[in-house]
Structure formats: C-alpha cells, structure tokens
C-alpha cells in the first residue's frame, strides 16, 4: 500500500495476465518488445520525483496517506482546473481519471437505487488510490446487428451479460471493444454501453476486476510498430498505446466489486457519466493538438519565407480560430462546473459536448489547412538515416536550405512532426480518434439536445415571433 | 444637461441636419414616415422608467449626476459583463457604447503622443454623457482604387482628409460609408479607416462633430420599407435602422473636438480600438441570433411532429453547437478581460476576434440547417391579411393544422420569424451584416494573427518535434 | 385552337378564377397591380415573334399544327439539350415543361396499370399543346403531423383525397402548398406528394383541372411588392412570381381528366417523375445563377482594383468550381439520358439529383464568397433616386469613383445586382428555393441512394479489400 | 527494341543507378527487399499477355512496330477515353502517360520557338516507345526562400540550373523533389517548376536523361515498410511506390536530349502541360477512390444492420454526390477535349482543374463521413495473425458476428480496407496526395482563373444588372 515506483509498477504487470498480440500469446509483457514503449510511457506516470510534473502529482488523501492526484475528487473550480490540466500529462492519467471521476460523480445517483453499490464504488476507489493502481474504461460491446437490442441478437453474448448469479457474486460473459491500455492497467472497470430496457436486466451490469482474473483475455492492436525513430516519428515514437479487444469468458465477480447488476434505470447514467469524462479528456487533447497545429503551420510557413503570404496567413487564422474556440470551451466547462449532491464538482456537460463536437466535426477539414501549408515535403522528406549518411546527407543539407537562420535539421523535424501527427499511421489514427473517442458525433449530438436550455430558447423565439410577451434578457 | 426624455430626444433631432432618402431632401426627420420606426426604436433608449430595462439603465456618474449606463466605464469583470449585456438592448446602445468605450480605452495611448487629444476625448465623453447624447461610429472611407494608398487616388478626397488647418481648428473633406443610424444621433465620431503611413498625415484624422454641422450631409438607405406588419414581419418591423452615406463637404472642426490630426502612428490604434468594440457588439448579436435559431428550429420541427426525426435532431444539434460556441467565447472574452493603464477593462481581443470570426465564417452554412428544417412554407405562407379574411382564413386554419396543442397562428408566426430573420429583406441583410460588420473576415484574421500567443505555440511545436526541450504545460 | 398571342393569353385569365392576395379577393387579376409584373413576364412566353427566343419557340407538331416547343417530346440527345436550354427562358416555360414532360415520361408505366389513365395523359397533353395552355405542378400536401400517415391525421383532408366517386368522375378535397404561378396558368396538374400504402387508396390521386373549376381557390404570396425599380432591383423587378396556397373544396373531376384514382403503386412513380423534371429545372437555374456569381464577383473585384489580390482570386476560383461542377453535371445528365419504352428521352436521374444536391447543399456557403468580395456597399449603396437628385447625386458620383474606366452607374448596378440576388427579399427567397425547390435535400439523397450503381461499388470495394477477385475496370 | 517482358524490365534496372534508402546506398535495387513490392507492381505493367488488361495494352505504332498503349497519341474522343481509362491501371502507366502526353501536347508550341527542341521531343518519345521504357516526371525544385526568385537564392542551385553549355550539350546542377518512382524508371524527364523571367534563362531548362547518368543520385522514401500482409493492409500491400529526392550533381545532357535551354517564354507552358496530365491522373484516381468510399461505406453499414438508419443513409448520399460529381467532371473533360494544331487531343483544361480542385478541397471532409460510419473498429480490429491463432481467433469470430449472411473475415477485410485507405500510413499519405499531387490547391485555382470564360460571365452579369443589353443564352 502506498505510492508505487516505476519499477514496482512494472513488476506489478507480471501477474499472469493473458494477452495476445499479432498471433502470439505473450506470457510476460514486461519482457516483450511490443510493449516496451507503452510500458515506458505508463511507468513515467509513477515518477513522483521527476522534474517535469513530479511533486505536483502527489497529494495527501483525507485518510492521511498519499495518492496520485488523479484520484483527488475535485471540490472547487481550482481543483477541477488542476484535474483537467493533469489529464494532459499522460494517456494513463487521462484514462484512470476518467474512470474514477465518472464513478465518483455518479455515486450519489447510484446510492439512491442501491446503497451497497455506492459503497462498492467508494471502496474500489479507495483501494485503487491507496495501492496506486491504474484502471481502464471498459464500455463498448460488439453490438452485433444494430437493428436489434441486446437480448434479441443471434448470440446473446454480443452484449456483455450476467450468465449466473449466486451468493458470492455474478458470472459475466461477453467482450468489450476499443479498450485503450487494457493490458497495461490493473483494473478493468466495466460499464454498460448504453441504456437498457426492462427486459434487459442481465445486460445492465457494471463492476471492476483485476486484469489477471480468470477468464479475462486481451487481444491487442496498435497503429505503431515496436520501435520508431524519434527524429522521423517525433510524435508516435512516444505515444503508442495498445487498444484491447477484451474477452470475458465466464468471469466471476464477487459482490463487493459489483456496481450494477440488473437495475436498468442506472445503465444509461453510468454510461453518460463516463462519457462526460472521456470527452473531457478528448477536449484536453483537442486543445493540445490544435495549438500544435498553429505552431507547426507558422513554423513551416516561416521557414520557407512564406509568412507574408496572405493565403498562408488566412489558413493560419483558421487554425487559430479552431484552437481558440476549443480552448475557450474547455475553460468555460471548468468555470461553469456542475456539482453532485455530495459536493464533487465536474465539468459542464453541455460545454464539454459542444466543444468536443466542434473539435470532432471539424478536425478533418482543419487538418486540410495544415496539409495545404505543408506541401509535398510532408510526405517525401528523406529519413534521418539518409541525413546521417555522409554521401546523401550533404545533398539533403544543401537542398533543404531556405534562408539564413533556418536550421535544416529543425526544418526536417517540423515536417516530420506534421507528417507523423496528421499524415502517417499515427496521423491516420488521429482522424478516427478525434471523431470516435468518447462516443462519436451522434453521442455528442444526443447529449447537446438533452442538456441545452431548450425551454429558454423556445420562449425567446416565441417572444421574438410575437407569440409570447418578451422578457428582459 | 441631464437625462433626456424620449420626447426631448425627438425634439433634439429637429436641429437643421441635412438628410436625403430616396431622392428627397428631408427637412424634419421627426415628421417623415421613413424615420418613424427608427426614431421610435431609438427613443425607447431614453425610457428610463420603462419596466423592461428602465431603472437599470441609469447610473450615478463620478460627478454626482446621472448618466445612461452605456457611458459607464467598466472597471471590473462585473462592470464589463453588465456593459456587454446592455449592448444587446438596442442598436443605438450598441453603437454609442462602441464609440465611447473605444475612445476611452485608447485614451491612455493617445495621451502618450499628445495629451491635448486625450483631454479632448475625456471632455467629449463627459459632454455627451452629461447631455445624454448618442453618437455614430464613422470610419469607412470610400477607398477608391484599392491598389493605391490614400494619397495616390485619382481624387485625393476618396479618403477623408484635412484640407486646411488654422488656429481655430481644421477643415475636413471626404465621405464615410456604412454609417449606421447617422441621421438619428447627435454626434458623428470620425476615425481613420486603417493605419496611415508617414506621407499620409492629412489622412490621419479623428474628431467628433454634431450632425447638424455645416457641410455634413447624409444620404440614407435601409433594407426596410416605411411600414411593416408585425405578424408577417416580426423581426424587421421593429429592427430597421438606416445606414448613412455621410458627406463632409469642407467641414470645420474646432481644435477642442479633434482627437488626431496628423500623428500617423495613432491611426491604426484608434481604428483597432473601435474595431474591438464593434466586434463585441457583433458577438453579442451573434449570441442572441444563434439562440433564436435553435429555438425556431426546435419549434418548427416539433410543431409538425418531426421532433423524433434523427436527421432533424442532427441539424438542431449543429445549431446548438454554433450557439454554445459563440456564447462561451463571449463569456470568455469578458472573464479574461484586458485593462488599460488607467484601469478601464475591455473584452479580450483574441477571444472577441475568434468568436466573431467563427460566427461570420459559419453564418451562411448554419442558416442552411434552419432552412432545411423549415421547408417551403417559410416562403409560401399566406399573409396575415389572408388569415383575417374570413373566406380565405378558414382554409388557412384548416390546412395549417398539424396536431393537438399546436396553435395555427403561433405556427404561422414561427414561420414568419424564420423567413423575416433569414429569408427576406432583413434576412438577406443579416447574411452580409454577419460577415461584414466590424470589418469583414480579413480584419478578424489579421487581429487573430497579431494577438495569438504564437511564440508559445511555436515553442510547443518545436518541443513536440524534438527540436527544443519540452517544458511543463 | 392554335398558338396564342400575349393579348389572348391575358384575356384567357379573365375566366372567373378565385384568387386572394393580402386579404383581398381579386376578381380580375389582369387589372390588379399585384399581378402586373407576373402577368407581363408570363405573357412574354407567348411572343413567338420576338427577336430574343421567338421563332425558336415554335415547332410543328406531329399533327401538323404548331406548338410551343415546351411541348415537344424529346426523342434524341439534341432534342433534350434544346428542351433543357429552353427551361432557362422563363419560369412558366420551366413549370409547364416540367409538368408535361413528367406526365409523358411516366405514361408507359401508367399504361401498364391502367391504359385509360395513359390515354387521359396523352389527351390532356395534346389539348394543352394545341390550345397553347400553361400548367402548374400541384404536389405538396399540407401533411399535418409528420409522424402520422395520410389517413391517420386529425383531419383526413390534410392530404388531398377522393371524397366521392361516381360514374362521371371523382370529387376531391384538400389543399396543396407552394404552387408557383397557380393563379397565372390554365391547368392545375395534381399529383400525389409521395408514395402511398395499400390502405391509402383515396390519397393516390392525380388529375388535371382548369384553374376556374368550381371549388378551386388560390391564396397568393410573393417575396416582391407590386412595383420595383429596375436600377435598384435589377433581378427581382423582372422575376417575381406568386406562390399559391391552392384549396380544393370538393372539386369535381371528370374521369377523362383523371390520371390516377386509387392505384397506390403508381403514386410514388408520378411523384418521382415530376421530381426529376423539377430538379432539372433547378439545375438549369443553378447553372445560370452560379455563372452570374462568378461574373459579379469578378466585376465587383476588378472595379475596386482588387483583381490582383490573392485572397480575392481564391474566392473567385471557389465560385468557378461551383459553377463548372454544376454545368458539367447538367450536361452529363443530358448526354447520358434515359429512355422510356416508347422512345422519349429524359435526363439522367442520378446525374440530376447529384448536381441538384451539390447546388443546394453548397449554395449558402458559396454565397458567402460573393458576400465576402462584395463588402458593405452591397447593403448601404444609396438608391437610384438619390443618384438622380442633383444635390446628393454629385456626392455619390464623386465618392463612388474608383479608377479610370469604371463607370459609377455600372458599378452601382453591379452592387445592386449582388444585393438583389443574394441579400434582399429576392436573395433571401433564393436561399430557400435553392434548398427546397424540387423536394429538399432528403428527397435528393433518397434518389441518389436508389439510383447509384451500388452493386458495382460494393463489388469493387470487396475486390479491393481482397474479399472478391478483382475484375477489370 | 520492341516490347519488354517483365523479366527484361527488371534486368534493365541493373544499370548502375545510384540509389539511397534509409541511410544505405543500394547497388542493385532488384535484389533489395525495400524494392520488392514496387518492382513487382511496375513489372506487371509489362505483362502484355495477362488476362487482366493484357492484350488491350499493346498497339501497332505508325512505324509498324508495337508499343505500350500509354504511348499512343490520342486523336479522337474515343482514343482519349481509352488513354484516361488506362491511367487507372497502374502508377507507372499514369506517370509515363503524363510525361509523354504532356511533351507531345506542347510540342507544337515548342516548335514555334525552336524546331530543334520539338524534334528532340519527337525523337525521345519514339525512342522510349520503341524500347518500351518508362519515365518519371521531374519538376519540383527545392525553391529555398519563397520570397525570392530562382536567381536570388542564397545558393543559386536551389532551382535546377544550367551551369555550363558547350557544343556537345549542357551541364545542369540542382535537385528535384517528390519524384514518384524515380528509382524504378528508365528516363527522368525534367521540366521547369514554373514560369521564369528574362533574367532567369539558366533556370528555363528541360531535358530527358537515363537514370544511370553520371551525377544523378536518388534518395528514396516511402510510407510503407518493405512487407505488409494483404489481409491487414489490403491497399498498401500492393500500392507502395517510393518517392525520390533526385540530385543532379553536374550532370551532362547532350543537345539531342534537350527540350529547353533558356527560352524563358516556354518554361510555364511546359510546366502547365505536365500539370494538366498530372491532374488528369489525379482525377482518374479520384474517381476510383471515391467509388471505393461509397462501396466501403455501404458495406460497413449493411454489415452491422444499419442500412435503414437515416443518418447513415445521409452520409452515404454525401459520398455518392462526391463520387458522381468527380466522375461526371472527368467524363466531361474527355468529351469536351481540346486539340493541338497537329491534331493531338487532350483533356479539357478547365474541367480537369475544376474536378481536381473539387476532389482535393473536399477530400478531408468527405473521409469524415466514412470515418463516422466506420466507427472505432476501423482502428481496433485485431490482426489477421490473431484471427488465425486458434485461442484468440475463436473469440474474434464469436464477437465480430453481426447477423446471418455476414462473413466475419469479409467484415474484417472491409474494416481493414477502410483503415488502410484512410486511417493508417497509406491513408495519411492519401490525404496529402489528394491535396498536393499535381500542384496543390493554388495551382488549380490559378488555372481555373485563367481558363474560365470570364468574358462571358462578366457580360451576362452586366446584362442581368441592366448595364448591358441581354443576349440570348
């Protein structure tokens, strides 16, 4: 119990978990080249004394111990802003924050239906905090035929379900898709993928179990090969994280780890609560990436002497608009937070959904501006190895010169960053992630339609149309 | 001296001002049908005791008198939010606020160059406040051939200029375009349309003069006829305001009303200061209209029983995104205000420009969603008179019924509001106003390029590309 | 029998038809100021000897008489191109072409179900051709609550229906919306608004009746006032055409004018056939307007000396792309025509729907480019009367000068044309018409989904994915 | 002399050419794993007897021999359609077609300036045709600082230039970027990157030389690793082609291979001629890819039972519009061909530029529809090896089932195809290629502005505005 070191974290992954990748069953992921980069990234989250974020990551819990700050439940605007800022530090921080903040923010609603579940949430939260564990969000079911509901599928397991219940707990069967970092965390926090109806009680299920629980199997996938050179791949050499296809092959879950087992009215609340935090993570990433787009656009333009070109300036202004609208939306969501009955604050639902939707719906078109500014060299730039080779390197240096003060290597890095971020394997992945992470455009539209103050908008429209007396604004 | 009544305001317009409209020289605008609606609208701004905004419009000035709150210089976030909220009350409030807030926020910079000008600004501000006057923003020159600068035009008067200077003052000649409400205010506050170069000192000129000054002539234009029925034209029957083509035919301006007369380095500062406040007014209007779009879209959809239609819901979600992104940008601009050395606060320049640009650049496409939802009845709905005619009215009532609880007249008003706001004379005007008011897309792009924290964005991009060490976020 | 003169056409409108406008029942539309412009426009269609299109409008029918060329059934690519070209001549040509071409192109399908109906179509076609009549397309029902089908509405008349049948004919009741030029034609050709189901036989009804038939009442509406000056309103002063809300108050239709009375399987075919011709008319108009946009954009830009400005050039290139893509789509639709079993050719359904959709979906955003280039003068230009007034006119001439060779009046006309076409009552109307005429975006999407060669596209996708052997392209 | 076999082609690459890749100088590319896929692809172009395109690729030249049909100069609409169809067969066909068609279509213009150059073009064309050679388009210079012209750069070699001339020929120095397939062809056909001015005669240079000429060095780059599994990478496993950074280190070119050496007036004509054919190749590819998008979108939607979903149908209709507008533009360009004085036909310049621009400007946003339909599985689908592994494969088969008739492996291939084509290394590359190939958006805008019939558009606009008498359409 207590904060782990990076080494302890790595050691903790050697727990018999069952993981597949590229046709191979991997017995010890800490020794396998495929996992080298992802584990190194995640282990950094345990560097409590590093100069970068180090000290600021640790906080004193209300029980007098220390916890990673991702576990700190925000109770003020400042807390929330700190939490949101921290979501940008690492993928694993974002994920674990999302899971536990979602559980804690829905806890009061759960308690109204079944206080035992709420206690389980609280206990699991403290357990993970006090053992410095990380957790994955486990939501999306395979869903089979979308025309049919969960219990109408050819195979009843196409949505994860309870196949047995007894005094000790429940047994679940099914699979969950798109589980980022599933092989690298300690706990899998499972939630329903959407609301369920009265006749779907076996599908209204939520719980948390360790990754090495019997019956859990993870098939991994990543956009990145095991090793990437950081000159040619400045973004993806540091950022790859495997996605898991997680199978629950008759997995037993003891009652004290169950958060929902049949109360259909809670299914959509849990899903929405996690959705909000996932999208918050998405908007944090959106703010980071969109600022990078502006910087890269300006650099690539300046470096070739086109910074006075009016068409280039227009494209950069479009990128600025995108970056600023997102940043302002994120900040608004934090300053106009919402609050649970027990005093936990969380980001404004409408603001997060609007900002995430704006980001997702306009991502592709926005990248077009960057591609327009970048030109063909984004794709055709020679590799670092060719630069280092004396014969070919001298030509590269000669012909990529543009003007005094522009260093050729720096210029190459800027092109590589644009390509890696928007026009290569990681870049291609980003297009889909921007759109689909946290639930896709339809999920955000739904939440906006639900949370917008439609009553006021209709009243104002009627007043303006002369059908209602106008009120003061 | 002191606050005027509506009647006093109207009387004050009978001062010999020279005004043309539709080929006619109008001697007394208070008696002319063309001006009936605009004057009624503006006179309302003087109803200090009306239930709508009344009392809240009056404030105690630092001199112990009372002033209209549009003159109150904001010194805190709360002040600024109030000022911005008030900009939505009436066109004349927005305009006068823009003029005086711009002058007062640039005053410190003017003082550095010429303290006398700054004193003139302060004096004119107090004079207008204490006499409860209204003012128009007078900026855009005809500009002639855009390839040439001011002093290179075929006719040197194509930009307003100083044609003579003497001990008492200056004489100016030229014209200014797009001067909203020029015929309805007391003071014309003239500013340069853009930055001027060293050899253009005669064009770097700013001052304020009464509308009835000798040599001032105004040619009016409006999108609206003199009278419009408020059932068929719920928006434009209340909102028309004439635009003035204002001629300065050798107009004398005494030195104590001059704010700039040759100091070219101040020309662009004055222009930008006014631009910021004009765009703030634009974003206030954007927030109002975009919320109306949502309300109208929802009403027209519900009233025909299509509120469960997924494609309609998508379009409404797009309208919500637009409305929310604008509203959040406006609020951000107020909470992240900037400050002059002497303590006046004003909206965040980057935020206002980004929000205004987002509004303007996406206005046309956003209206498409509303038009898509509205359908053909937006155009083909019979007129109120046909509804009131018993013979035709009975058919209209019969055939525009949709479902229980939907009142046919209310439904007609909603269609009329959509048409009037987006698909008729006022609606057509709105498309151009959304785009051009406060300076057009290029002006906003320019300001974003200037005010964005490009240094930080470039550093982060270089760090991400591996060309600079990363800093904590 | 035979071709009419304009005077004969006007006389033919004095037939007791019942028409309302602005609350007034109008007994003789040929004497009423409201109808002056529309009747003048339509009467021009009868000028067989005018220099403009004159002679080319007349053709020798297969019966040896002469007909207006809008009645000529195209039997070759050349015929079709001529017909399509002619649709651009006048609104009434477009409408009448649409009606009769639709009926004639669906005739073979109708004959398979009921040869008597097909004979009626043929007879009505010849009758109208030989008497030189004009007809309106009468389709859209009020539809009431969109969640419910025709026979489920609160009022069964919310879709036009057969209320009685007897030996002589049928009696119909209902109303039809958006009927362009209803008061100005001779025949109302009624068709179902969409497909009907088995239990909706009373709603599957199509026929043609004279406008002055007992029980027919038309309530008119137009975007335009009775008179508009052609300097200030260069487009709308010539183009206004009233839209009719047409009531059928128990109207008797003899069997020989019935084209459908209960055979539900034909309802959607008739609707689609008319839809195709309506959209063809829409694409013809699209090609005309989009070319005007380019010309106006170039003129307004050149006249202020901005033709070398790269941002302006970009916007013009966007307008060119729009105009060319539409023009190429229209031409493709004609060269890749389809053919009925009896040899009539008609435009390619997929091509017309794709081109119309492209036009409609992008119209708003495209106008933005023109508004961006036009600037504020589009709205604030003084009126012609102010130009003609000597006092104000001299200032207008002085200050609207830009450079040698640019005539101020021509420049004013260009601004007026942009405003009238895109930013005034007619302009606002155009936005909705571009989107909604011929059925709105959903109708075009539906037709594309139905007519696209999806089988080939899926096979190629599967072959590319390695799931099917590739075929030669 | 005569047609080569695939083996002869491969053998012909062992000619001492100097090639670098990933830091290594490769002596024999036919033995190197990096080149395995690209050479296999190109060698297929020589399979004159394959069932796929085989026989149709061969034609009888006017000299009585046989040539690959890419060399056949089109002299009719049918010829042109065949040539364009053939451009879709392989990358190398497209490239070689582009080069020689461009040279042959500009030949008449070259002859007017210098008949010797035109003879050289004709001779090189026959030589390559008769020896069945392939050629690369060599255009883009590094360009250095874009603010300065060629001869003003820090290093005069930043645009390729003539450094010496003598009786035998010229010596050139410089580099060319983005040279697709440079290492895989026989001839490098060099052209100026843009128009040159009078003082830039050394930069107005065009010629063809063999790849193994002394002084030529190629640094390669590709988006793809050496080997890719065709189940997981159905597109890129077959389509990778290296891009070359081609250095000319004082390369001697004999006079009979020179097409331009100083006549600056020809520089932009050569560039534009090649640009047209490059963009034609781009539009051919656009038509292919956009049809794939439709097929993939429909498949992925149907396979999960969402084909009745209205929002999905809308997205598919958007994809159809995109595909059809491109296809119609391409066909229009061929049926409205242009013609050289000596009778060669080539695609319509305006049509190709408009269609290419439409494709490029809307590519990103269009892919968004496909990504929206595809969902997260596009990224997270397990690899083929995991499917083949019995333990993990059984889960994959169980949980990716959707409904009867949908084969899991086929479903996986469809997801892989979407990912590979739009959201992975090849997909990322496609975004930039769609935008930049053939010159980027600005180049297409420029050509549209130049070739559009602006005179007619302006006349029509003036006539509509009342400033010119209207003409018949």
Image (spheres, coloured by chain):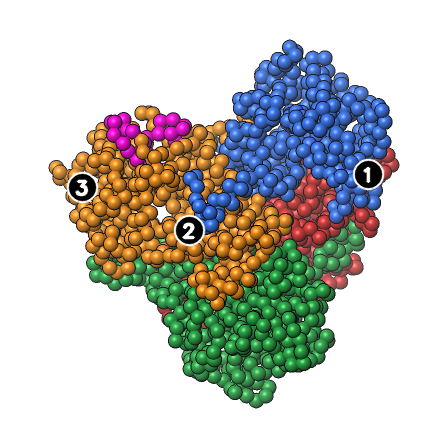
Chain colours: A red, B green, C orange, D blue
- Return the residue at label 3: C253
Q: Tell me if residue D68 can be seen.
A: yes
- Quick check: marks 3 and 1 in contact, CB under 8 Å? no
Q: Tell me if residue A176 can be seen.
A: no
Question: Foreground: A154 or B285?
Answer: B285
Q: Which residues are magenta?
A: C60-80
Question: Could you tell me which secondary element the residue under label 3 belongs to?
Answer: strand
Q: Is residue C62 magenta?
A: yes
- Return the residue at label 1: D157
- Return the residue at label 2: C235
Question: Could you tell me which secondary element the residue under label 2 belongs to?
Answer: loop
Q: Residue at x 65, y 31 (%)?
A: D273
x, y percent for residue C459: 51, 28
Q: Badge 1 local density, few (<14 within 10 Å), some, or many (20+)?
A: many
- Numbered disc 1: what chain? D
Question: Foreground: C176 or A15?
Answer: C176
Q: Nearer the viewer, mark 2 or mark 1?
A: 2
x, y percent for residue B299: 39, 59
Q: Is residue A116 above or below residue B4?
A: above
Q: Are marks 2 and 1 on the same chain?
A: no
- Quick check: marks 2 and 1 in contact, CB under 8 Å? no
Alpha-carbon distance for marks 2 and 3? Answer: 39 Å
Q: Earlier in the sequence, mark 2 or mark 3?
A: 2
Quadrant housing residue D127: top right
Residue positioned most to the right: A390
Q: Is residue A404 above or below residue B451?
A: above
Quadrant housing residue D249: top right
């Amino acid at each position: 119990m207590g904060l782990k070191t990076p080494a302890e974290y790595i050691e903790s992954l050697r727990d018999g978990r069952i993981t597949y990748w590229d046709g191979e069953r991997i017995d010890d992921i800490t020794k396998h080249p495929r996992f080298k980069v992802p584990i190194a990234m995640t282990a950094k989250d345990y560097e409590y004394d590093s100069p970068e974020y180090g000290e600021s990551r640790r906080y004193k819990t209300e029980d007098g111990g220390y916890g990673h700050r991702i576990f700190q439940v925000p109770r003020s605007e400042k807390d929330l802003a700190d939490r949101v800022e921290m979501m940008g530090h690492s993928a694993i921080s974002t994920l674990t924050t999302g899971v536990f903040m979602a559980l804690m923010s829905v806890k009061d609603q759960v308690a109204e239906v079944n206080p035992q579940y709420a206690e389980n949430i609280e206990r699991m939260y403290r357990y993970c905090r006090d053992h410095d564990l990380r957790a994955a969000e486990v939501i999306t079911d395979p869903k089979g035929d979308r025309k049919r509901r969960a219990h109408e599928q050819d195979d009843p397991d196409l949505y994860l379900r309870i196949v047995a219940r007894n005094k000790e707990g429940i047994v679940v069967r099914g699979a969950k898709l798109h589980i980022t970092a599933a092989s690298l965390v300690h706990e899998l926090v499972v939630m329903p993928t959407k609301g369920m109806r009265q006749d779907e009680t076996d599908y209204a299920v939520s719980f948390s179990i360790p990754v090495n629980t019997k019956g859990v199997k993870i098939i991994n996938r990543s956009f990145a090969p095991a090793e990437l050179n950081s000159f040619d791949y400045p973004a993806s050499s540091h950022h790859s994280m495997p996605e898991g296809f997680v199978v629950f092959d008759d997995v037993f879950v003891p009652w004290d780890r169950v958060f929902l087992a049949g109360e259909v009215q809670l299914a959509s609340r849990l899903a929405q609560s996690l959705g909000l935090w996932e999208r918050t993570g998405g908007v944090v990433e959106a703010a980071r990436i969109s600022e990078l787009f502006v910087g890269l656009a300006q650099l690539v333009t300046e470096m070739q002497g086109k910074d006075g070109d009016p068409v280039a300036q227009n494209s950069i202004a479009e990128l600025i608009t995108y970056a600023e609208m997102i940043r302002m939306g994120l900040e608004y969501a934090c300053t106009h937070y919402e609050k649970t009955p027990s005093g936990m604050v969380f980001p404004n639902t409408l603001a997060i959904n609007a900002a995430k939707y704006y980001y997702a719906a306009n991502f592709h078109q926005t990248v077009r501006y960057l591609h327009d500014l970048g030109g063909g060299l984004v794709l055709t730039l020679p590799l670092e190895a060719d630069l280092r080779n004396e014969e070919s390197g001298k030509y590269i240096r000669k012909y990529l010169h543009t003007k005094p003060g522009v260093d050729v290597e720096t210029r190459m890095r800027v092109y590589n960053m644009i390509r890696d971020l928007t026009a290569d394997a990681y870049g291609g992945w980003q297009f889909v992630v921007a759109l689909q992470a946290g639930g896709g455009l339809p999920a955000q539209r739904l939440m906006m339609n639900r949370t917008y103050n439609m009553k006021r908008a209709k009243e104002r429209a009627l007043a303006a149309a002369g059908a209602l007396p106008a009120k003061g604004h």
